Image: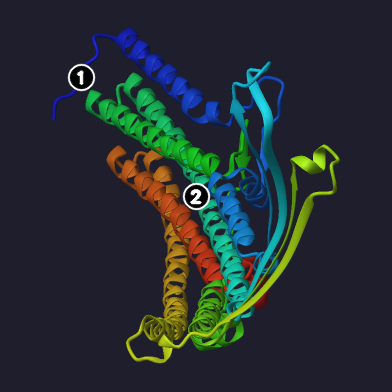
Amino acid sequence: MASYVYKDKTDYEEDILYHKALYAVLLLLLVLSPLAAAEGEAVRTVSLDEALESAAAKNIDLQSASLTLQQTLRSNDSATDFIPDLYLTGSVGGTGSVGGTGSLVDMSGSWSGSASLGINWEMASTDFTSLHVKEAARSLAYLAAESSTKSVEDSVIDAYFNLGAMYEAVRVSEENVRLSQEELDSVQAAYDAGQATSLALSQAKYNLLSAQGSLSSQQGSLRLAEITLRSLTGLEGDFVVEEVGDVTYMDLPDAQTLYDDHAAGTLALRTAEAGVASASAGLSSTKASSYWPTLSVSAGYSFGVNKDAVSYNGRNYGDNASVTVSMSIPISSWIPSSSGDVAVKNAQDSLTQAKLSLQDAKDSLMTGIESSLQQLSAAEDDAKLAQASLDVAQESYDLSKAAYDAGQLSLSDLNSARTSLYTSQLSLVNAKYSYISTAYDLASLLDVDLDALESQYKENS
């Protein structure tokens, strides 16, 4: 392995100063700048609830879902089926001749005008069954809006804790850089005393640059995590989030118990049940339109006037009122393979499919709970193992540092111990984030608050 040999001590010291300055600049740009507040302003800490509230107010997907909900509710307003059609019409016309004695236009012709007011109301059997159809449509619309909200909230929660985990990862990387700098300073002192080779010095410099590179990578991931949270929540200005901190492990019951306790309130089952109600209402409406009679009522009033009435030569005007009632009874729908018969059979199939979807939703929920419990158990094991590994790595590093300072351990061995410590620290950060993320996934699946779930099933230490 080739190594750089300094010309003299001054050359070496200038190189050390350069790398120290470079390290300071990197820390300033990569660590302090994204977390620094604008001049004269304090950096605010945003809680998870505040992030969710901001998303509820500013998230574009939620705003779009709200508009879609309002449109669906308006389109399925039951009152529209019982409001009659009203109309008002009017006309005026006349005849005359062109030419004549003493006048270009002879107005001795006739003219007339008329106006009419009408109302038309049709009452069909489907007007009553459509009440249930529209009620089901409104229920599905509310559930769709709830699903959109839930999806955004899940994304916000994941992004929030990911950002908190990245803060910890950056801090761990900063500590790794600090230890690498200490190693380089120690090698420098040994080199000045003639007790270390230029190879050892080059290795220490490389180790520092490698640690700085890891810090830069973690800081870049932090920036991306912050961008993701901003895009979901619309948060503005400088802010930080709460770090992951310690995790609360849960002693959860089996999947069947969780299913029995929470299945009825889950969004998945409520949506599937609403689908069955909608299909059932659709079948009733289709049967009504295919087999039941339709009653139509129309009424009108008209008024007409002619030239004599205007010239007051008699009272020559007329009005008229009319009322029409009719009933239509479908017959062809009783014929097999007719359009009405086919429509009813298709509606029956739709109801059967909705019931199958409900059963599938129940099976999927049970499978999801079982899978989440397995993943959560694995995540808990990983987190506890990561903590134990970190304890061992910390002890190993402390012993290695003491042995190195006493001249009983090589720089390479010390660097290996420090690298193991750094890796263990990052593994614990990732393991804690993975456990919390998985716990939130389970709570989301059950449609319960994680705090309530943790309070109910908190693991005894």
Q: Is residue 97 above or below residue 346?
A: above
The residue shown at (64%, 27%) is 37
* Residue position for label 1: 4
Residue 113 image-quadrant placement: top right
| 337 relative position to 160: left or right | left
| 113 relative position to 357: left or right | right
* Mark 1 residue element: loop
The residue shown at (42%, 20%) is 20
Q: Nearer the viewer, residue 104 or 180?
A: 104
Q: Earlier in the sequence, mark 1 or mark 2?
A: 1
| Front disc: 1 or 2 | 2
User: Three-letter amino acid code at disc 2?
Assistant: Asn
Q: Position of residue 231 (x, y in %)?
A: 52, 40
Q: Nearer the viewer, residue 126 or 347?
A: 126
Q: Can residue 399 be seen in this snapshot?
A: no
Q: Nearer the viewer, residue 276 or 37?
A: 276
Quadrant containing the C terminus in the rendered view: bottom right
Q: Residue furthest front?
A: 101
* Residue position for label 2: 162
User: Three-letter amino acid code at disc 1?
Assistant: Tyr
Q: Position of residue 391 (x, y in %)?
A: 47, 58
Check disc 1: other Cα within 10 Å, few if <14, some if 14-19, many if 20+.
Answer: few
| 306 relative position to 221: left or right | right
Q: Nearer the viewer, residue 43 or 57?
A: 57
Coloration mode? rainbow
* Mark 2 residue element: helix
The residue shown at (35%, 45%) is 419
Q: Is residue 53 above or below residue 83?
A: above
Q: Position of residue 448 (x, y in %)?
A: 62, 71
